[in-house]
Image (spheres, rainbow, N blue to C red):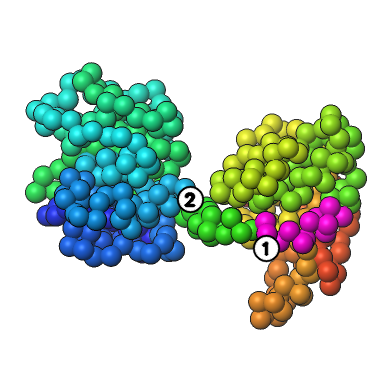
């Protein structure tokens, strides 16, 4: 199911209310009753989001110990991978502990929490931006006197530092009670609806990160033999000393040393990937010596227009859900006359055979499909090779921006 609910203690009708709210958004859900010793999923396969409900104190009574249980390992994997997590009520403490924070339960919170405010950080938060303050009388189940530096406080009051926080860009702890036996409060219904929309919008990225995070540690050793082919492909870009080069979908950064060789000490090299674990592996293999590493979506790059002279991209374009949007974005950041080099260390026929299928006439990388795709997004195809040992397409950024098709 896209959303898995980890239930730490009996919640009565509230769990059903959460499931019903998710159902209205079109997302399926599955509840794991940890308090009844139902086993959590072994990994994040097929999970687009996690919701944590229930009492951490109930879990601490378990002789196995909170920090050693399989569901905490699952939460830590979600934090590392970027799977969206919403921890509600007492569940916010479980999330904090999974992240390695100390979070003390504060006594007397149900007697009041002072004046509640949204922090300035909440104004730009993906989940709480535009949300109203919790309604009067909505009480927190937990308060946090201190959070780690990496956690962003979103909702606070004059008695406690944080009642809601975000860890990274994908995990939220919201310590207010969900409601009562009669169901969810309207405020919580709105939060869960926004979380469901966020899960749906990020599903493609979530699956990508989950796939590559599991493989990041072994990626370099598995494909290191391809490094000379990457260097030979980079040489075909004809970069100049002082140039600005980007490796999009860089993985462990195998193209970065060659890019640095061609732009020289005065040039700029940037490796961009969607999966933080891949960038961590790139740093471990010394690729940060050749340029900067950045986690970003290749269809929404945090780079100025016309700021790049060359883009190298290996095995990325035809795996994107909207390659035309990506090509248009790559044209935006490229200077007129800039180079785009699409590469793969094996040809299309070789890859199709390896996966037990015939060549697909609709394949974006087939020349009759790739050429018009490039031309309508700001590029002119200048070289095309689909050989036994590699695929390579070189394109040049046109002087005039391409028209945007409706």
Q: Is residue 74 above or below residue 404?
A: below
Residue 389 spot, x, y in % from top left: 83, 69
Q: Give the magenta part as a residue range.
A: 220-233
Principal secondary structure, stretch drawn in magenta: helix
Q: Quadrant of residue 178?
A: top left
Q: Which residue is painted at 40% across and 49% down in the image?
A: 76
- Decide if residue 14 is on the left or right side of residue 49: left
Q: Is residue 322 above or below residue 56?
A: below
Q: Is residue 248 magenta?
A: no
Under tag 2, what secondary structure?
helix
- Decide if residue 316 is on the left or right side of residue 182: right
Q: Which residue is mark 2?
A: 81
Q: Which residue is painted at 35% across and 45% down in the image?
A: 98
- Decide if residue 45 is on the left or right side of residue 254: left
> 93 or 175: which is nearer to us?
93
Q: What number is the disc on residue 37?
A: none
Under tag 1, what secondary structure?
helix
Residue 71 spot, x, y in % from top left: 32, 56
Q: Quadrant of residue 22?
A: bottom left
Disc 2 packing (10 Å; few <14; some 14–19; many ≥20): many
- Mark 1 or mark 2: whose residue is earlier in sequence: 2
Between the residue at mark 1 and the residue at mark 2, the CA separation in whole angstroms equals 21 Å
Quarter that holds the N terminus? bottom left
> 282 or 61: which is nearer to us?
61
Q: Which residue is painted at 71% across and 43% down in the image?
A: 287
Q: Is residue 306 above or below residue 62?
A: above
Q: Which residue is mark 1?
A: 222
Q: Is residue 104 above or below residue 382?
A: above
Q: Is residue 11 visible?
A: yes
Q: Are marks 1 and 2 in contact (CB under 8 Å)?
A: no
- Decide if residue 202 is on the left or right side of residue 54: right
Residue 109 spot, x, y in % from top left: 14, 29
């Amino acid at each position: 199911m896209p959303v898995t609910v980890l239930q730490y203690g009996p919640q009565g009708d509230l769990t059903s209310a959460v499931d019903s709210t998710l159902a209205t958004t079109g997302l399926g859900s599955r509840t794991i009753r940890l308090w009844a010793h139902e086993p959590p999923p072994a990994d994040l396969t097929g999970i687009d989001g996690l919701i944590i409900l229930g009492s951490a104190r109930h879990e601490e009574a378990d002789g196995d110990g909170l920090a050693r249980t399989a569901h905490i390992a699952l939460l830590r994997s979600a934090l590392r991978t970027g799977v969206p997590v919403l921890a509600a009520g007492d569940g916010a403490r479980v999330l904090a502990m999974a992240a390695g924070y100390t979070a003390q339960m504060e006594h007397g919170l149900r007697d009041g929490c002072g004046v509640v405010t949204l922090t300035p950080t909440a104004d730009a938060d993906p989940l709480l931006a535009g949300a109203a303050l919790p309604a009067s009388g909505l009480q927190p189940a937990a308060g946090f006197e201190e959070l780690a530096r990496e956690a962003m406080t979103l909702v606070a009051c004059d008695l406690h530092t944080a009642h809601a926080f975000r860890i990274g860009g994908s995990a939220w702890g919201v310590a207010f009670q969900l409601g009562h036996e009669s169901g969810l409060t309207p405020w919580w219904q709105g939060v869960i609806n926004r979380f469901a929309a966020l899960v749906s919008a990020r599903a493609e990225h979530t699956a990508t990160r989950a796939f590559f995070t599991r493989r990041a540690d072994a990626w370099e050793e598995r494909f290191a033999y391809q490094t000379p082919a990457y260097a030979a492909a980079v040489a075909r870009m004809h970069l100049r000393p002082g140039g600005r080069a980007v490796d999009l979908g860089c993985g462990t950064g195998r193209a970065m040393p060659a890019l640095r060789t061609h732009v020289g000490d005065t040039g700029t090299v940037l490796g961009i990937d969607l999966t933080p674990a891949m960038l961590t592996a790139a740093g471990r293999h010394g690729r940060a010596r050749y340029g900067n590493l950045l986690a970003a979506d290749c269809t929404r790059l945090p780079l100025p227009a016309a700021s790049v002279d060359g883009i190298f991209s290996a095995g990325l374009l035809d795996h994107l859900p909207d390659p035309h949007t990506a090509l248009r974005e790559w044209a935006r950041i490229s200077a007129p006359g800039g180079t785009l080099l699409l590469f793969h260390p094996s040809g299309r026929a070789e890859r199709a055979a390896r996966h037990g299928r015939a060549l697909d006439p609709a394949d974006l990388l087939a020349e009759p499909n790739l050429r018009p795709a490039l031309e309508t997004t700001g590029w002119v195809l200048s070289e095309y090779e689909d050989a036994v040992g590699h695929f390579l397409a070189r394109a040049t950024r046109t002087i005039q921006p391409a028209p945007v098709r409706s």
